Amino acid sequence: MRGLGRLIALLVAVWFACWAPAGARAAGAELSALEVQRADDGLTIGYAVSFELPRGAEEALAKSVPLYFVAEAEVFRDRWYWRDKRIASASRIWRIVYQPLTSNYRVTFAGISQSYATRAEAFAAIRRGVNWKVAELSQLEEGARHYVEFSFRLDTSLLPRPMQIGIGTQPDWALAVERTQRFD
């Protein structure tokens, strides 16, 4: 009898996972492109992230709560005798907020703000990165093996303090993608 109950519970879980409506599933991010290149002035990264904003974050943005997105890259050198050595790290932070008086979305990056008429245009500005310099050429050792750990996420730690209470464990605010890529 116990085995039958477990089997039914498993079948129900599989049915919900496969047939649940798209809106009921947890939102996630997908890294559709990641290119690591050695250039004349250093190591550069190009990336493209596709995602749908989680429902909770979408509701907060509609109420003019600023959202913060963070892209981070860390460059490591392989070592056989100890933990791999981190030789460089870089991060980018975007702030996006809806302004109801003008019905615009404002994206701020590195102290520069740009207004967009639609939400799609505003998010298109943060979904791609091209020629992002993450390390100097002098930091990379010739003949050594290196790799990059890249991550892109919705950073809830930068939200206003009253909103941070309790959202750390809610799947409505989970939006992150990570990838490791080797290069020579």
Image: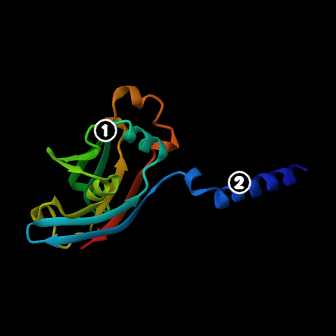
Residue that carries the numbered disc 2 in the rendered image: 13
Q: Position of residue 97 (x, y in %)?
A: 29, 41
Left/right of residue 82 with respect to residue 168 in the rendered view: left
**In this orientation, does residue 59 appear?**
yes
Most extreme residue toward the top is 162
Q: Position of residue 73 (x, y in %)?
A: 27, 56
Q: Residue at x 77, y 51 (%)?
A: 9
Query: To which quarter of the image does residue 87 belong?
Result: bottom left
Tell me the amino acid under the disc marked 1.
Pro
Residue that carries the numbered disc 1 in the rendered image: 100
Q: Residue at x 35, y 61 (%)?
A: 49
The disc at residue 142 is none
* Tag 2–tag 1 contact (CB < 8 Å): no
Query: To which quarter of the image does residue 66 belong?
Result: top left
Which of the two residues, 167 or 59, is positioned nearer the viewer here? 59
Most extreme residue toward the right is 1
Q: Secondary structure at mark 1?
A: loop
Tell me the amino acid under the disc marked 2.
Ala
Q: How many marks?
A: 2
Q: Secondary structure at mark 2?
A: helix
Q: What is the distance, in whole Å, between disc 2 and disc 1 at their CAs?
A: 41 Å
